[in-house]
Image (spheres, helix red, strand yellow):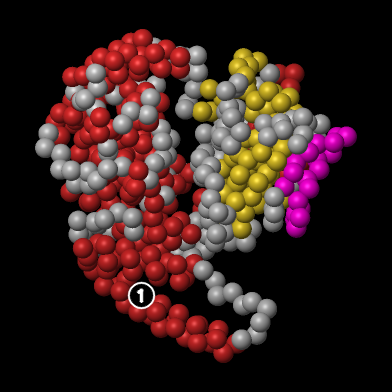
Amino acid sequence: MNIIEMAALLSVETSKIGLFTEVDFAEMERKLELEKHNHPDLTDELISQLFDALKNHSKSFQAVMNNRALFNFFAKKNLSKKQFQEESEIEDKQAIKGFIQTYLIDELNPIVYDKIGANDFQEIALLTEAHQFLPDRVSEKIIYYATEKLELANKALKPPFGDFSKILYIKDANFFTFLNGFKNETIEEQVKALFTTVMNMYIADKSSELAKRTFTAMKNYHTLDEQLSKNIGMLKESAEINYKPFAVNRKKYYWIYAVVGLILVIRVSMFISDISEMNSQYDSYQNYDDYEMQSEPRQIDRYYTDMKFKIDSFRVFLADYNQTQIRRLTKLSNIKTGQNPFETFYENQPTGESNNYLRVRNTSNYDVVLLENAVLYDSIKMPRTAHFIKAGESVAVNFNNADTKTIFNIYMGKKLATFQTESNHLFVRNGSIVEYRFSELIPNVKEVLETDYVFKNDADINFVNGHLRIDSEGLIEN
């Protein structure tokens, strides 16, 4: 809890800040005392800080409340721009920085640094809209970590290659939106170096899914160099043309396919010349000797071809351990339906509800973790995210990648916890505790977990008489 959350809890009108009377403060205190029953972290010290900020720093308080990025971040809301007054020019930005440093720094630092460490840039990408109001020390640290992320990605994408699973944020548009807020010449040079490395990878393998998605995400970075922006756009379009196969549907309109195919051939030939020109522009950044060029280029990124082994290992970790060896068990009691319990493998956070989602209900007496996967290159399963569903509850699963096939695996049990066993298959969170898994499993958990499901409509998951039962129209089981 922080003072902005408290102001939102009280429905404080931004326009009235600075005009409150002692009667108003007494009424606020009365309401907050009542709210203590629902909010254990609402302390007398925080109430005192709220009143001090409202009385002595009303203009800065008002500015933070009226700034959409700052308010949503600290109040943990997602209000639209229409719900805020049109911002006027802020004359004293240093005062707002000092206000955040005094009253909100304990809330700001852990969230920002934890999010960057977890490669979760969605929330802090929105915060960067208000980067000019962040304390200087915070901005300096963020720039340092951003540069470090770019250097790590650039190094991992060059032979002998690093662990691609550690740099998947380069496919995330939020990462490059986040970079926009703190853009300077150093970050620009790092982005330019990363672009060149990915370009070399794309030249070596035109079907690279990683290159295609990186170029698409990179378009969200507003470059200082106009030519770099044009080059990113050209490579993005070229990669999309080369990656997506020309699919024939059931109707045999062959003349249409011939025309479209001819257009694609012409555009690809144009991009070949564009790429040749770009190579000369970036001689100072690229080193073709560092990137292995083969007569038969690698058709699929090595990260994807290694994924089956990693998924199999994670399944062993989840379901094939010796329950008599369990020790140092700590139960996870505060997880809610819809959250992702994992950090080490299915590490992406679930997206919110949209107009394109399925409702999955858990009607069993067991808890469920629904593992969501994308299928690339027709056969390679890529972990996307995981959805925890308590017994008797349901979750909305949003499909956020329309160009990939989505399949699900089902993990069921009771008492989600962290614990140790003697297994060699081990996944550790933040280098300290073992990843969460069920300490009590359904009888045939391995068989259930290994089965792939394709949901076409809403689904009900149940476990009856030792067998998994799924009620869903159009269900496909592999």
Q: Position of residue 113 (x, y in %)?
A: 35, 31
Q: Position of residue 386 (x, y in %)?
A: 59, 40
Q: Position of residue 68 (x, y in %)?
A: 31, 40
Crowd class of label 1 (few under 14; some 14 to 19; many from 20; radius 10 Å): some
- Front position in the image: 325 or 47: 47
Q: Total number of numbered labels?
A: 1
- The reply, left or right, for residue 56 in relation to residue 440 is left
User: In the rendered view, would you say 28 is above or below 83?
Assistant: above
Residue lying furthest bottom in this view? 255
Q: Position of residue 337 (x, y in %)?
A: 61, 33
Q: Residue at 19%, 46% (x, y): give it.
A: 184
Identify the image quadrant of the N terminus.
top left
Residue lying furthest right in this view? 465
Q: Residue at 25%, 62% (x, y): give it.
A: 228
Q: Residue at 25%, 34% (x, y): give it.
A: 15
User: Is 461 included in the stretch rendered in magenta?
Assistant: yes
- Front position in the image: 422 or 166: 166
- Front position in the image: 32 or 49: 32
Residue bearing mark 1: 271
Looking at the rendering, the stretch of residues picked out in magenta corresponds to: 459-478
Q: Residue at 54%, 71% (x, y): give it.
A: 245
Tell me the chief SS of the magenta region: strand
- The reply, left or right, for residue 109 in relation to residue 294 is left
Per the image, label 1 sits on a secondary structure element best described as helix
